[in-house]
Structure formats: C-alpha cells, structure tokens
C-alpha cells in the first residue's frame, strides 16, 4: 500500500519533470535546421541559366555539396572562389558541387558569373521552394549529401578554404 | 445623436449624485417607523430607485453613442473609462438587492461619479475605428471585461468600507497611513478633475515649441499652466506664465505638468481638510460607517469577487485571446496590457486561494481587494498612457 | 500506517480532523469552530514525511507554496513590462545598444539581466512549470479525500460536530414529537430544492454539491492549457512565417512545405473621408494624416497538382478566393494567412528611351522589368542596349564596390551599355557608351557620351505583407480554456450548502455549513424557520467577532 503510493508519486513526478526538462531542452538546444545531419535529403529540381533542369536524385552515388548563395552575400563570394579553384579535382573523385542561387534575377546571376569568372553551372531556386524546404535562413548555407542521399552535415556562415576542402573530402564516396 | 448621448451622460452624473445624497440621508437621517412599528427606510429605497434611473440614463448615453458612431462606444480612453463607471453602477444595482446594504450605495455612487468625471477629461469626440478594431469581438471582449471589472470594483468599495469602519484612527499606525494615502489618491483625482474643468472653462491653453527626444523641433499644448516646461521650450501663445523648471527631452512634459498640478491640488485639498478638522481624513469618515455590519461587508466583498472574477477572466483573458488570435495572428503576445490583465487575474486567484484555503478574511482580505482595484486602475491608466503597446487606443 | 478509530466505530486515516463518518472532531483544535476545509479529511501530503519523493510531493501539494508561485509569477511578469520586450523594439535596432540609448543605465541593466526577453527565459518557464506541477499535485491530493468524504457522509452526526459548525442552534422548546417537526422541515427544504436524506428521524439537507468540484475542474482546465502552451516549444506544432506578394504575382506560402501558393489579385487601401463619415468629422480634423479605414488583399489560394519534385514547374489549381483583411484571415487546412503589413508603390518596371542631342530617337523606347530584366534590348534602327549590371537595392559596400542589399527593387540602379547600329554588341572587342541609371540619377561612365538614356516612365505596384500561421496547440488551449471557465463558473456561481437537523431528548439541534455564501444559507434557515419552525441559528463567527475574537473565523493554520 505504502509502496504503491510511493511508486505512484514517483512516476507522476518523473513524468512531469521529464516533460518540463525535455521542453526546456528543445527550446534552448542549438537550433536544428529543418533538414539537418542524419536526415534524408529531400529531392528537388532546379534549372540553370540556359533552362536545363537537373534533379538532386540524378547524383545518387556521388557526394553532393549544395551551396545556397546570393550575389549580395560577400562570404558566398569567398567560398565560391575556393570552390572554383578545386571543384574539378573533386568532380573526378565523384563529388558534385551544386550552386543554388536564392531567387535573384537571371541577369544578376549571369553578370555575377561573368564578373567573377566562374565556369561552373549556376542554378536558380525560383520561388525559393528549395531553400524553404531545406530551411535556409542565412547565407551561405551548405548541405553535404553523401552517395546514399543522406545529409551528413549542415553548415551556415563563412568558411575558410581549409574547411571547405575538408568538407569536400568527407563527400568522396567510400571515404 | 452624439449631442443626445452626451446630454444623457450629464443627466446620469447628476442622478448618481442624487442617489448618493439619498443614501447619505438613509444612514445619517432619522429612521421612520410606519404604523405597524416596523422601521422603514424610505431614503434608501429612493436611493436605489435613483440609482436604477441613473444606470438606465447612462445606458441611454451608451446606446445613443453606439448608434451615432456605428460601433460599441468602448474604443478609446473616454469611452472605456465611462463604460467602467457605468459598469460599476450596474454591478451595484445588481448586488444591492442581495444584501440591501446602504453603506455600499453611499460609497459606490461617488466612485462611479469620480470615474465618469475622470473619463470626461479625455478627448470626447467620436473617433474612427482603425482596421484592427473593426470586429464584433471589440464589443464582446471589451464589454465583458468592463462588466467584470465593474463587479470587482464593488469588492473594492466593500473592502474600503470595512477598513474605514475598523481601523483605529487614534493611533499613528501603518494602517492609518496606508488608508490616508488611499484617500489622498482619491482626493488628488478629484483635484485633477476640478482643475481640469476649471482651466477648461477658462479656455486655458498654452502652446510651446520645443526640441523633442529625437532632437526635432515640435509643438506641444498645455491645458494646465506650465510649472514644468518642455525641453528648450518657448511659448508661442501669450499667457503670462513662464515655466519654472525645464524637463529633459525624453519626459512628456505636459503630462508631467498635469501630474504635478494634480498632486499639488490633492495636497492642498487634503491639507485643508486635515487643518480644519485636525484629524486624519479617515477618522472624519469613520462616524458614517460606525454601525456597519463587518461580517456582511466582508461577505459582500468576497461575493463580488466570486461573481466578477469569472466574468473578468472570460472577457479580459479568454475573449481577449480569441480576438488576438484573429486580429493579431497570435492569441498571446506579451503586450503590456495583456501582461497586466494576466497579473490582475493572478492577483485575484491568489486572493481566492488565500481566502478559501488560508483563511484570510476580514481585514487582510479588504487590503488585498484595495490592491486588486489599484491593479485594475493601473492597467487602465498607467499601462495605456505611459507604457506604450498595441493597446494604445484604450 | 496508523489509523484513528472514532467512537462510532469508523476507522479514519491518520491525520483526519473530523471523523469521516459521524463528524466527531478527532483532534483538539484551537478555535471554537470545526475545520471544515476538505471536510476535515486527512490530506495525504500533510500526514507523513518520509523520503525525498514525499518531500517534493508535499512541497508542491501545499496551497501556501502554490500561492507563492502565483505571487512570484505575478512579480516576474510585471518586470517584463518596465521596458518593451525585444520583440517590440524596432526590428532594425540592435538590442545590446538600443536599451542603453533609449533608457540609459537602467535600460542597460534590464538588457544585461535578460529582461528584454523575460517571458522566454529559462527561469520564467520554470516558474510556469512549477505552477503546473503544483496544480497537478495539489488537486490530486485534495480531490480524492474530498470525494470520499462527501460520498461517505452520514446523516447522523456527532453532537460535537454540530456544535462546532458556524451556524448552530438548539431549540428552546422541547417537542413531544420532534421527528414530525423534522418531517415538516424536510418538506420545506425540498421546496428550496435541497436533497433531503433521513436516518432515524434525523435530517441532512444538501444542495449544489457539484459546486465543490469547480476548483478541481478549473485546475484540470489550466493544466490542459499549460500542456498546450508547452507543446508550442515543439517546432512541428507551430508555423510562423511571413510572405510578401506583389499585386498580380503568385508566391509560395512559406511554412507549408510547398503545399500552397498565394496569388495577389489586387491590394486595396481605403481612408476615412470626413465628408462621407461625418460622425468622425471632429476627430478627423484633429488628425493630420489620413486614417486608414481598411486594407485588404484580394487573394487566391492555389495548390500544385499532385506529383512532381520540389522546384520543378507544375500547374497550380485554385482552391479558394478570399479578401484577406485584418480581423478576417484566409484559413484553410489549419493554416491561416493574416493581413499584417503592406507596402505601397514599389517599383516594378522602368521605361527608358535613347536620346541623341537631347532628342529622343523614335522607336527606341524599352521597358525593363525590375524583377526579371533581360540581358539586352534590341531597339529600332539597329540600336542595342545591354544591361551590364543590375542592382535592385543599390548600395556601396565596405570595399566601395557597388552591390545590392537584397532582392527587393527599392532603389534600383542599372548600368547600361549602348551599341549604336555601327557597333556589333557580340564582338568582344567593342565597347559601347556606358551610363549608370537610377531614380533621379543619370551618370555617364564613359567619356564624351553621345547618346543618353532617359528614364521616361516607372510602373509601381503595391505589395501585401501576410503572416502565415498554423498552430496545432490551439485545440488544447481551447479545450483547456473551456474546461477552466466551466469549472470557475461551477465553483463561483453555485455554493454547496448543508443543513443538519437532529433531535435529542425532544430538543431539535440544527447546524449549517456553506463553503461560501453563508448569507444565502441563512436565508434558507430563515425560510425553514418560518415554514416549519426550525430554530434559527446564530452565526458563531459573528459572535466571535463581537467578543473580540479573531475575524478569521474558525480557520486554523495548516
């Protein structure tokens, strides 16, 4: 009888404290992205400047580095400089870099490409559909997707060349 | 229609005064006995009937203004405060028959008059509704809240009577000081209104040009002679009264000036009373209430909370949340007015627990009820006029 | 554990004040009156203190602790209104400097203490949690014994129990047949809608017992409400996004995972007019700026046809039309779109023309869509204009290079290159004349420009700002709020009243208890007195007072 009451009180208290603890944990733990490490990367389709469409699913089997960017984002410029220098080496090893612009005009993207001499393809996320799905709020935002289509890392903000390269290394299939 | 409505409010004001007089007579005057020998208190009956007429007349004001404006007249400070006065009178008319306590009438009616007079110090013209207020919920939320607050005000009046009757004014205790402070507050409110009407009737207005908090040249009107002048203020109008002190830019100097006038006026009236009678103001009132039945007054005060608290909660929190969800996209946003409604709710909840579970009856309960009403008035006046928020209209 | 046996034979749990069966006081109490709170039953928490769990339990079970929690919550809440919360300061302001700038040292302190985001702070949430825990435990601890006591109560009570009720009297007269007297009383009280029970001629009349459950019902409502509030912290329960839509355009509704699109057919703003709305004339004349009467978005909600990858083009099908206004959101599938903001006259198209020697060259007008400019424009007579750079919202960045702040054409600037018929724009070695155009701006970037580009016309568009919400916690809050109100009304507007009337040696003993509104109970006694001649009881609490006793009638400190 006494024991039963003890167990009853203990379980009621435990449930309530666990609920409060979990709520606080959720509220104050570092913000998790809508799509984050461990999730399956949602498939999407985007077009490049000449209206050719690609899908993320086309790159199953390759590591994919998705870079969300805009012309007005200065950190994006640095990062795209590093990627410009190295992307071809990684492409040979099965790592694809996708540059997705967040819905600026084709003209701006084109001119930006010319101005900085990028020779990779640029894709535009019309209507910000993909950015919304991935929960992109600040730029640059990078998503590392392995050969099985799983997100292995999400990174927001500026990165050094070293950091970009080590991210790309992680994406080499079978590494 | 608008003219009719304001005339009805004037008429109601004098009916409240008349009712006060009847109740005063019923308590101090001689009691009449009819042939059967039972005591009849005709003055009390007259007081109650007058109160009913006063409430009907005030409701006439309310209806006429509703028709004139096209929406319930509860959308700005004048309209809300007047509605609060009417709600207190309405609550009295409903509660009086339960207890037939004439002291309640004697004290409630002046409070109603004070609040209606205070209301009329705000701009009285009919103002157009901004889009956020265009909803039936304006009517539902505000009227329910104001009725709840009106009933809670009765508990304050009953608490006040209780304390006035039981405090020993012959000693200099904290209780006496607190009560004197409450009475001073009421006197200062009277002073504010009297001065306001006085300067208003004299047509006093002073225009200043001054430098505001954003370092921009602006203009400011004074309706009380400037004791406190605005930052780098210069008089535009000729009126022969120069400010004595200049305020910094981030203080609303004309409001501060009004507060100074009210406090000084209050001190003057209070001082005059103290000097002429040579005892605390509470002690002057006490003989009026010497025969009051403390248990009944205590019961009335609690009963008013029991009736008013659910209505206030429904209007001030539940209906408020429903409307906020519709108009402001979220049911709760920690706007100062919302927070102070929550504080009022929590305060009365604490009161109920203290009374029901901890046995706080009588005197302690009465002090709490005075604080409770102070919170309501604080939310009406201070939160609106000083803490800016979404409820900036009323 | 130890039980207390009453002389009537009933075994009461340890800690009982009044015998659960006959009501005989089991503990010596200070006051004259019985402690009727929770019917004098043993509140579990009060009765023993053993281990940590019991101690925590007892702590939260105490009403005193509960009241303290309410007071702390009240004071904490008020602190948050001293200065505006972070969400109400201007969006562009940096809180770390704003509070100091606006409110000085106190403001800085306010910010440093974290009071600028008080209601989301961990300690405020903990106070709310403590309130919730206290509600659960305190209610559980009381409702069970109270239920048992009210269900078990016997008609016949111990004379000591009656004697210690606040309303109590013994008849002066001695009746030959007191039971008949009680029969009459029973009839009278039934007319007053009392439930009357009899036992050996004794009488128990009871009314509105359900009111006793009011407090527990409203606590349950509050607990549900707090659970709803707690669920708010889980991201999947709550969507709060905003979307700006230009007139004539379709945007995806943020936060719906691409499920819905919103099309802005037209945006309207109307102002009050002091002639048409003459009742507001006086107020409108005192206002310098026009007062907005209404603003609305004539919107259409759309849905992409089934199937298809995110981002790929799919056809949209219409779901519904709605004029979104303040107080009238568009609601569909749990989502609501609210009118919250608008922006009038955003640039949408610029029309330019080419000039030579201040004369417009016929047929060289061209229009640039600022939200989708072309790379180049082929004009009449072989003229070509190329856009070299486009900055929708121009600024010079920290390296003094031209750039754009964002995608919104608030301050559009364009660098044009003009190719007259004799120059081939596709030849990489030729350069045309370059000029820099914007609103009130026309700057030649190459020397001795022959041609000039002039801005001849600008198209403007209104943009509506909508907020997207979906709140899956609402059902909890509605249920909680409704239950709370029901409980509050149940406990406030009805009062449990009981009248005991017993006979002993030809005398009639009456006692009464109400948990509130004694006044009404006295009136019922008055009625029974007039109708059936029951003795009218004295109010022992009032007697106490007159004898100079405490006005806290009969309550003992817990």
Image: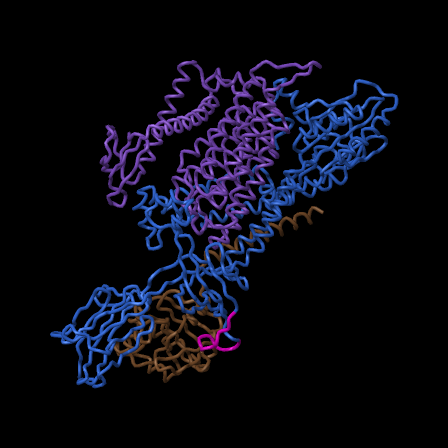
Q: How many labels does the image show?
A: 0
Q: Is residue B281 visible?
A: yes
Q: Which chain is purple?
A: B
Most common SS among magenta residues: loop
Residue B22 place in picture, x, y as percent:
55, 21
Nearest the viewer among A72 and A142 is A72
Q: Which residue lies furthest to the right in this view?
A: C176
Q: Which chain shows up in blue? A: C
Q: Which color is chain A depicted in?
A: brown
Tell me which corner region of the image, top left, top right, bottom left or bottom right, holds residue B379: top left
Query: Is B296 on the left-hand or right-hand side of B172?
Result: right
Measured from the top left, where is residue B60 in percent x and y? 53, 36
Viewer-side residue, C205 vs B136: B136
Magenta region: C306-318
The answer to which of C55 and A34 lies nearer the viewer is A34
Horizontal relation, residue B392 to residue C470: left or right: left
The image quadrant of residue C174 is top right
Q: Residue furthest left?
A: C448
Q: Residue at x 59, y 38 (%)?
A: C63
When the figure is inspected, residue C424 is found, relative to residue C460, above or below; the finding is below
In which quadrant is the C terminus of chain B drawn?
A: top left
Is C155 covered by the magenta stretch? no
Q: Provide residue C215's location: percent of width, then percent of height.
A: 63, 41
Whether residue C312 appears in magenta in the rendering, the answer is: yes
C359 or C342, nearer to the observer: C359
């Amino acid at each position: 009888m006494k024991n039963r009451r003890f167990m009853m009180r203990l379980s009621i208290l435990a449930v309530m404290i666990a609920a409060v603890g979990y709520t606080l944990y959720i509220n104050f733990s570092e913000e998790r992205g809508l799509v984050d490490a461990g999730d399956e990367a949602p498939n999407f389709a985007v077009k490049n400047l000449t209206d050719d469409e690609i899908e993320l699913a086309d790159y199953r089997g390759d590591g994919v580095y998705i870079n969300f960017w805009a012309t007005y984002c200065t950190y994006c410029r640095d990062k795209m400089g590093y990627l410009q220098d190295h992307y071809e080496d990684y492409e040979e090893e099965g790592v694809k870099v996708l540059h997705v612009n967040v819905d600026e005009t084709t003209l701006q993207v084109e001119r930006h490409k010319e101005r900085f001499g990028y020779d990779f393809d640029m894709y535009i996320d019309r209507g910000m559909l993909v950015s919304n799905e991935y929960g992109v709020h600040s730029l640059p935002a990078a998503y590392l997707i392995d050969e099985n289509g799983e997100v292995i890392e999400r990174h927001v903000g500026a990165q050094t060349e070293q950091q970009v390269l080590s991210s790309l290394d992680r994406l080499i299939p079978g590494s | 229609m608008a003219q009719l409505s304001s005339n009805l409010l004037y008429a109601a004001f004098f009916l409240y005064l008349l009712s006060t007089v009847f109740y005063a007579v019923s308590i101090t005057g001689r009691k009449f006995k009819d042939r059967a020998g039972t005591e009849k208190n005709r003055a009390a009956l007259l007081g109650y009937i007058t109160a009913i007429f006063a409430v009907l007349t005030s409701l006439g004001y309310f209806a006429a203004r509703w028709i004139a404006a096209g929406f319930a007249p509860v959308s700005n400070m004048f309209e809300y405060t007047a509605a609060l006065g009417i709600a207190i009178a309405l609550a009295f008319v409903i509660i009086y028959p339960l207890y037939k306590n004439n002291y309640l009438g004697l004290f409630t009616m002046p409070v109603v008059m004070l609040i209606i007079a205070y209301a009329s110090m705000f701009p009285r013209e009919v103002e157009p509704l901004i889009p956020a207020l265009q909803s039936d919920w304006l009517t539902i939320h505000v009227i329910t809240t104001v009725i709840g607050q009106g009933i809670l005000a009765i508990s304050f009046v009953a608490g006040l009577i209780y304390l006035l009757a039981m405090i020993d004014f012959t000693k200099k205790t904290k209780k006496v000081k607190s009560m004197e402070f409450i009475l001073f507050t009421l006197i200062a409110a009277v002073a504010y209104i009297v001065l306001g009407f006085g300067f208003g009737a004299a047509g006093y207005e002073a225009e200043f040009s001054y430098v505001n908090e954003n370092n921009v040249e602006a203009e400011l009107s004074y309706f009380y002679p400037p004791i406190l002048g605005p930052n780098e203020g210069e008089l535009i109008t000729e009126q022969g009264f120069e400010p004595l002190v200049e305020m910094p830019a981030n203080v609303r100097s004309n409001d501060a000036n009004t507060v100074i006038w009210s406090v000084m006026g209050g001190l003057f009236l209070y001082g005059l009373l103290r000097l002429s009678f040579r005892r605390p103001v509470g002690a002057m009132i006490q003989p009026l209430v010497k025969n009051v039945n403390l248990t009944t007054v205590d019961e009335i005060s609690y009963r008013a909370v029991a009736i008013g608290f659910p209505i206030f909660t429904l209007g001030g929190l539940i209906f408020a949340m429903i409307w906020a969800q519709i108009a402001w996209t979220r049911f709760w946003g920690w706007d100062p007015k919302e927070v102070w409604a929550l504080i009022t709710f929590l305060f009365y909840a604490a009161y109920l627990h203290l009374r029901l579970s901890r046995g706080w009856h009588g005197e302690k309960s009465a002090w709490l009820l005075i604080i409770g009403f102070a919170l309501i008035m604080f939310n009406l006046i201070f939160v609106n006029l000083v803490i800016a928020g979404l409820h900036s209209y009323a | 554990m130890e039980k207390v046996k009453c002389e009537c034979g009933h075994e009461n749990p340890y800690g009982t004040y009044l015998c659960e069966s006959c009501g005989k006081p089991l503990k010596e109490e200070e006051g004259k009156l019985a402690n009727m709170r929770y019917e004098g039953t043993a509140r579990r928490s009060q009765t023993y203190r053993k281990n940590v769990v019991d101690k925590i339990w007892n702590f939260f079970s105490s009403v005193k602790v509960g009241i303290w929690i309410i007071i702390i919550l009240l004071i904490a809440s008020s602190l948050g209104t001293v200065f505006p919360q972070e969400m109400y300061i201007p969006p562009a302001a940096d809180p770390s400097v704003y509070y100091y700038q606006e409110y000085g040292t106190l403001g800085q302190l306010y910010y440093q203490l974290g009071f600028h985001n008080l209601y989301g702070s961990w300690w405020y949430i903990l106070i709310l949690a403590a309130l919730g825990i206290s509600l659960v435990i305190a209610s559980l601890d009381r409702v069970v014994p109270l239920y048992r006591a009210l269900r078990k109560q016997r008609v016949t009570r111990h004379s000591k129990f009656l004697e210690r009720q606040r309303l109590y009297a013994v008849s002066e007269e001695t009746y030959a047949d007191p039971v008949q007297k009680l029969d009459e009383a029973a009839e009278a009280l039934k007319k007053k809608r009392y439930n009357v029970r009899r036992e050996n001629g004794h009488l128990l009349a009871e009314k509105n017992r359900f009111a006793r459950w009011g407090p527990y019902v409203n606590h349950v409502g509050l607990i549900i409400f707090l659970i709803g509030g707690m669920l708010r912290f889980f991201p999947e329960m709550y969507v709060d996004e905003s979307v700006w839509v230009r007139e004539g355009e379709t945007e995806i509704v943020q936060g719906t995972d691409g499920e819905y699109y919103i099309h802005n057919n037209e945006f309207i703003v109307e102002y009050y007019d002091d002639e048409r709305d003459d009742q507001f004339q006086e107020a409108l004349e005192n206002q310098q700026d026009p007062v907005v009467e209404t603003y609305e978005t004539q919107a259409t909600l759309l849905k992409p046809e089934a199937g298809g990858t995110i981002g790929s083009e799919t056809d949209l099908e219409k779901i519904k039309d709605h004029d979104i206004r303040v107080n009238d959101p568009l609601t569909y599938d749990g989502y609501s779109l609210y009118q919250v903001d608008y922006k009038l006259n955003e640039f949408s198209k610029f029309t330019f023309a080419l000039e030579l020697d201040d004369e417009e060259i016929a047929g060289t007008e061209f229009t640039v869509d600022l939200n989708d400019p072309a790379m180049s424009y082929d004009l009449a007579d072989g003229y070509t204009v190329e856009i070299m750079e486009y900055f929708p919202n121009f600024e010079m960045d920290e390296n003094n290079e031209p750039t754009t702040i964002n995608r919104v054409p608030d301050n559009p600037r364009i660098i044009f290159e003009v190719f007259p018929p004799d120059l081939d724009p596709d030849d990489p070695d030729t350069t045309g004349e370059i000029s820099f155009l914007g609103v009130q701006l026309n700057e030649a970037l190459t020397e001795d420009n022959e041609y000039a580009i002039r801005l001849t016309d600008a198209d403007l568009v209104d943009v509506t700002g909508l907020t997207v919400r979906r709140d899956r916690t609402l059902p909890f809050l509605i249920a909680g709020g409704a239950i709370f109100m029901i409980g509050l009304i149940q406990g406030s507007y009805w009062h449990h009243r009981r009248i005991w009337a017993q006979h002993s040696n030809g005398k009639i003993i009456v006692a009464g208890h109400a948990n509130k509104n004694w006044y009404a109970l006295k009136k019922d006694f008055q009625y029974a007195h007039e109708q059936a001649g029951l003795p009218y009881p004295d109010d022992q609490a009032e007697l106490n007072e007159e004898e100079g006793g405490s006005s806290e009638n009969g309550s003992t400190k817990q």
